[in-house]
Image (tube, grey):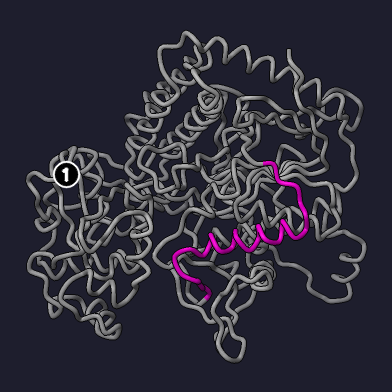
Amino acid sequence: MTHIPFTVVHTLILGSGAAGLAAAVRLRRAGVGDLLIVTEGLEMGTSINTGSDKQTYYKMSLCGDEADCPLAMARTYFDGGSMHGDLALVEASVSARAFLNLVDLGVPFPQDGFGQFVGYKTDHDPRRRATSIGPYTSREMCRALIGEVRSLEIPVRENRVAVELLTEAAEAADGAGEGERRVVGAVLIDSDGRFEIVAAENVVFATGGPGGLYQASVYPAVHTGGIGLALMAGASAQNLPESQFGLASTRFRWNVSGTYMQVVPRFVSTEADGQSDPREFLTEFFPTPGAMHSKVFLKGYQWPFDARKVVDGSSLVDLLVYRETVLEGRRVFLDFRTEPDCFSFDALSDEARTYLEKSDARLETPIARLAKMNPGAIGVYADHGIDLTAEPLEIAVCAQHNNGGLAGNRWWESVNLKHLFPIGEVNGSHGVSRPGGSALNAGQVGAIRAADFIAHRYAEKTVDSARVRELGAAVVERLEDWLTRGAGALESWAETRETFQRRMSRSGAQIRRVEELDEVVEQAWQAFESFEAAGSQCEKNADRIEALRNRYLCFAHAVYLEAIRDALGAGVGSRGSAIVLDRQGEPIHEKLDDAWRIVPEDLAFRQKVLETKVDGPRRVTNRWVPRREIPEEDLWFETAWQRFREGAIFE
């Protein structure tokens, strides 16, 4: 075997989104000097390449006379269901610290002349905790953090993809057998297809959400996510079935939320050629045009597909788009150039009409209303070669965010794989419903918590670097053998990925059916086992990278489908951003046949969290555990100060 580059570092950060960058900055400030950020590229990933009409950052209220405090904010998180109370309290308590750090780095969150950071209500939010700097909030966060990373001279190694986490078992405390497993590094591959090994005391795992699992996805095309790496290494997960889905454009991946819906565009369906048989397909499912247009308007506020809003609610729009595109094989477009059929301001609901009138947007076309209310929304598409004034915008119902993910404790360390710190979207801290924008807060909070714990508890070096080098070399030898074996494979990596992405979008997205999931799970594991046995064709270096990426993506999709099957089998029903269909369920709409009957939610499951333990292919255990309540802490100053001085808070 040729020489394999080998690096020893105290803390390795995998991923360079807003969470990973924040962790690196906080670690350096906390005195951890020996750091390395490994990334495909600082300009890649979800944080820097995505946004929405008015991308929201959620934090404790910092304006006006509206009372707020950590416990009140924690209760808002907790009320969403299936979220552990201690995690809710941490995300609330650290939110102001995380937010003001971004302000100090130069992110221009709006404030008034007195220094109050003004806010607004977002979805699932009873107070005005939300803020925004426009459609590119997370991008500007990344740019500010990248500037600080460079200022602090934190090493960044770009054009790398992690392909396996290295782990070993510690000796049991009583000296008998193995103790807990821990992470000790990672194997990487560079853009030229060459392997590298990194030994690390700690791994901050900031690889983002599972963007590569779905065919219909609003995640940036350059972002696939790395949760499968941790699942293959045995890291436990929680709430994997709890994803968010919603309407998004497909040529340029972008959520069509907020003003895009509030201006009430035309929804037009065509044949597969994008031109034949154009028709406004929503009309027949609403009692009047005014009722239909009012529901479209509400999609601005109620953008995610929501099981509670399918029957006589705004999410019926998403369901009909899904039915038109996936089941009927047609294409759906938003057309902002002309009014929808029979559109009338006077026929709108009071809420919709008042909003448009107060916005001085009682204008003759959707595009005129959009230009008046939010010209930047037009500019976003113009920046990507799409002119909303001249052409329709193709849309679909797409995967957007995973509320679940890897299971971490209140310091964001993996609950069963020590020294691994999943932060950002890959950490499954949230449950069924979360306030809009809370994901950005969670990433920053997780970065602070992980960095503080590492600096106070894991500052020493205990890893045997020679041993890690041996472990890594064995992994590289195994992967090289697998890649060589793939030369005779029948499928390319792209064909393999399309197959499992299509399976996830059909059976693991917003429309789910209990009776098909046993077969689908079996298909998923067969696909992974076949891929492991045969590999895929690798004609160039980029193929090597994508083939290895497919290993953990394909593994992850099987684990996700197992979790979904077990949740539905337990009787959780329709909740969050997914509905369960059953012919014995409740009818959704009188003009939809019996296949479109919805299983109601069993609310008892909101008091539980679904844990997923992975011990290898086909060895997945899912179990429901009671969620932990919000802690009632002793806040007497003198005793709390003592615990802090003594470092007892890190126990």
Residue 388 location (% of width, % of height): 25, 61
Residue 579 is covered by the magenta coloring: no
Amino acid beneath label 1: Gly
Specify whether 437 is left or right of 466.
left
State left or right for residue 363 relative to residue 635. Answer: left
Whether residue 478 sits left or right of residue 358 in the image: it is right
558 versus 293 height, above or below: above
Residue 273 appears in which quarter of the rendering?
A: top left
Q: Is residue 233 visible in this depiction of the protein?
A: no
Q: Secondary structure at mark 1?
A: loop
What residue is shown at x 30% (from left), y 55% (from top)?
386
245 in relation to 419, above or below: below
Q: How many discs mark residues in the rendered view?
A: 1
Q: Which residue is mark 1?
A: 274
Task: Give the percent coordinates (x, y) of residue 242.
Answer: 47, 47
Identified at 55% across, 54% down, the residue is 430
156 within the magenta span: yes
Q: Residues within 10 Å of mark 1 (few under 14, many from 20)?
A: some
In the image, taking residue 498 as reference, residue 464 lies left or right, namely: right
Can residue 388 be seen by looking at this rendering? yes
Magenta part of the chain: 129-157
Q: Between residues 272 and 316, which one lies in front from this camera angle?
A: 272
Front in this rendered view, residue 477 or 204? 477
- Residue at image coords 79%, 44%: 11
Q: Position of residue 579 (x, y in %)?
A: 33, 47
Between 424 and 305, the residue placed more toward the observer is 424
Q: Position of residue 152 (x, y in %)?
A: 78, 58
Quadrant of the rendering where the N terminus is positioned? top right
Give me the residue at 50% from left, 71% from top.
Answer: 132
User: 543 above or below 425?
Assistant: above
